[in-house]
Image: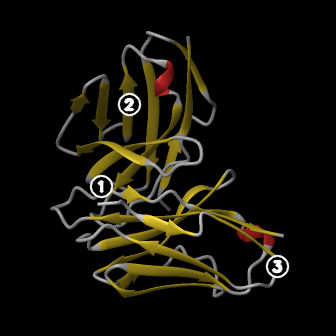
Amino acid sequence: DAGVIQSPRHEVTEMGQEVTLRCKPISGHDYLFWYRQTMMRGLELLIYFNNNVPIDDSGMPEDRFSAKMPNASFSTLKIQPSEPRDSAVYFCASSPRTGNTGELFFGEGSRLTVL
Amino acid sequence: SQKIEQNSEALNIQEGKTATLTCNYTNYSPAYLQWYRQDPGRGPVFLLLIRENEKEKRKERLKVTFDTTLKQSLFHITASQPADSATYLCAPSGSASKIIFGSGTRLSIRP
C-alpha cells in the first residue's frame, strides 16, 4: 500500500480564499483523523471519523472549518474563508480497526500558508 | 482538562549515551500510551505502544516505561546515534479512538 496520501503538499493562498485539503487513507482502515501542527500549539486533533461518520469534531477551531468523508477512501478538510492564523501543517492519519492498539499512520502533511 | 507535558527544551546527547525523554499527563487515566518519532517536514511515525497494565516495553534500542501512579512515561534510547535525532511525541490515550499528542521533545545526538 502507498500509505496515507495527502494533497496538496504545499498551498499558498490569500486571506479570504477557500482552501480544500484532501486525504486518501490506507485501504481497510476504519478510522481517519485530521490534525493541525504549529510551533506554538503542537499537534492538535481537529476531527476524526469512524466508518466515514464524524465522531468527534470538538477540535475544529470554528465554523470556517469543515470536514467530510463521502466514502472510505477519501476525506476533505475545507477552510472558508481562510485567515493568516490558519497557516500550519495539516496532517491526515488513518488507523485500522485492530483491537485497541490505535496506532496511527500519518500522511506527509499539507503545508498551508495564508497571506 | 486533559494536559500532556513533554520536555519543552531540546535535549542534546553525546553519541553512545542513553537519551531519556519524559511524558507527564494530568486529569485523565489513559488505558495506553504511544510514542512517535517525527523528522523535519515529515509526518509522525509510530514507534511503541504500552498499556496501563505493562510496566515496561522494549524494542531494539528503545525502552518505554509507564507509571500510572506518577502519571508518567519515560522513553529511553540506548547507545544513541546521530540518526536518532528527531522530535519525539507521546500520546497517552484513554479511548481507543481519540488520540491526543504532547508537544514533543526535540532530541539531538552529537557525534
B35 left or right of B59 in image: right
Q: Secondary structure at mark 3?
A: loop
Residue that carries the numbered disc 1 in the rendered image: A103
Mark number displayed over residue A15: 3
Chain ID of residue with mark 1 = A
Looking at this view, is B96 or A32 the one in front? A32
Residue type at numbered disc 1: Glu
Give the residue type that dot 3 points to. Answer: Met
Instruction: Tell which of A8 and B62 is nearer to you.
Output: A8
Of label 3 and label 1, which has the lower sequence position? 3
Task: State the CA–CA distance, disc 3 to disc 1.
Answer: 35 Å
Of residues A9 and B18, the one drawn nearer to the viewer in this rendering: A9
Q: Is residue B5 above or below residue A81?
A: above
Say whether marks 1 and 2 touch (CB < 8 Å).
Answer: no
Looking at the rendered image, the disc whose residue lies closer to the viewer, 2 or 3, is 3
Single out the mark in the foreground, 1 or 2: 1
